[in-house]
Image: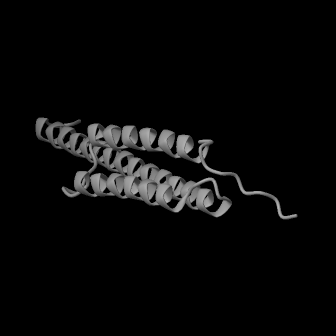
């Protein structure tokens, strides 16, 4: 038979375990969000490097795109300065990445650059 103090102790223990599990889940979610942001940054930087290598980006275009990537990285660093990345901060950074991705696509696929002529 459980006494009132045993039930109270058991309830407090269950509450502590639940709170710990919720905190761990929130931390894991924030960490996965930061990892997703970092991976996307790496992918976009790779797209920029490929564009320079294949000639679809000029030196000036590459510099502008790299500057945009740095701004996003700086925003991520500022958002995570307190040790956590909130859902709102993550959403803002991902929106900036969405915009930057569109810019990369548009600049890489513009047609105002002279095309390389095949060697004769």
Indicate the quadrant where residue 2 lies: top left
Q: Taking 4 as reference, is 83 above or below it?
A: below
The residue sitting at 54% across, 40% down in the picture is 106
In the rendered structure, the answer to whether residue 88 lies left or right of residue 96 reads left
Question: Where on the picture, by quarter, is residue 5?
Answer: top left
In-front residue for pair 11/106: 106
Q: Residue at x 64, y 63 (%)?
A: 53
Q: How is the image coloured?
A: one colour
Question: Residue at 48% of width from left, 42% of height from top?
Answer: 103
**Horizontal and vertical percent for residue 59?**
51, 62
Q: Nearer the viewer, residue 117 or 24?
A: 117
Left or right, 16 with reference to 68: left
Q: Position of residue 69 (x, y in %)?
A: 40, 55
Where, quadrant-wise, is the N terminus in this rendering? top left
Taking depth in this image into account, of 14 and 86 the one nearest to the observer is 86
**Quadrant the C terminus occupies:** bottom right
Residue situated furthest front in the rendering: 120
x and y percentages locating residue 6 in the rendered image: 17, 41
At a point 47% along the width and 59% down the height, the residue shown is 60
Vertical placement of residue 23 versus 8, above or below: below
* Residue placed furthest toward the right: 120
**Spot occupied by residue 94 in the image (x, y as percentages of width and height):** 39, 41
Count numbered badges in the picture: 0
């Amino acid at each position: 038979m459980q006494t009132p103090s045993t039930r109270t102790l058991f309830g407090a223990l269950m509450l502590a375990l639940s709170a710990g599990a919720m905190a761990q889940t929130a931390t894991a979610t924030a960490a996965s969000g930061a990892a997703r942001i970092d991976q996307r940054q790496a992918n976009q930087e790779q797209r920029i490097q490929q564009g320079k290598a294949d000639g679809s980006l000029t030196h000036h275009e590459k510099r502008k795109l790299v500057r945009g990537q740095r701004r996003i990285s700086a925003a991520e660093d500022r958002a995570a300065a307190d040790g956590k990345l909130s859902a709102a901060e993550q959403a803002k950074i991902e929106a900036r990445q969405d915009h930057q991705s569109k810019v990369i696509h548009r600049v890489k696929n513009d047609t105002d650059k002279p095309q390389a002529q095949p060697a004769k």
